[in-house]
Amino acid sequence: MKNHHSSHGNKIASSLLRQVFLVCATTALLTGCGQRGSLYIPTAPEAAQRSSIVDTLTKPASATQPSSDTNPAPAK
């Protein structure tokens, strides 16, 4: 004789898991990344010294961060 209770429990767990996933996905879509305003590619001279995402992903961490002696002191 089959146990119908475990089958029913699996359906409830699956439904609950689906609902939790949908709530999390909806929340993530609604909150976004927090960026405000238009996205653009910066063209200021300061931006030329920054690493691109490709550089960040392909180069070792020590190669992507400039040494402190090459950076001028911040303007006051």
Image (spheres, rainbow, N blue to C red):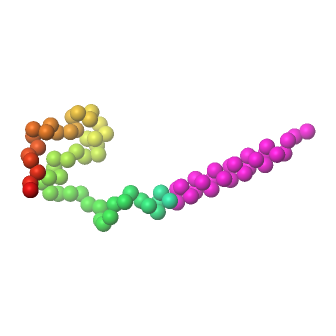
Tell me the residue at 52%/56% (across/down): 25
Classify 60 as above or below 37. Answer: above
In the rendered structure, which segment of residues is drawn in magenta?
A: 1-26
Give left or right: position of 30 versus 49.
right
* Residue 31: quadrant of the picture: bottom left
Tell me the residue at 29%/45% (across/down): 53
Magenta region includes residue 20: yes
Q: Outermost residue toward the front?
A: 76
| Coordinates of residue 54 in the picture (x, y in percent) | 28, 43
Magenta region includes residue 50: no
Q: Quadrant of the C terminus?
A: bottom left
| Coordinates of residue 8 in the picture (x, y in percent) | 78, 49
Tell me the residue at 16%/39% (across/down): 66
The answer to which of 73 and 47 lies nearer the viewer is 73
Classify 17 as above or below 27. Answer: above
Q: Outermost residue toward the bottom?
A: 37
Tell me the residue at 68%/53% (across/down): 15
Q: Quadrant of the N terminus?
A: top right
Give left or right: position of 31 versus 42.
right
Give left or right: position of 17 versus 46.
right
The answer to which of 6 and 53 lies nearer the viewer is 6
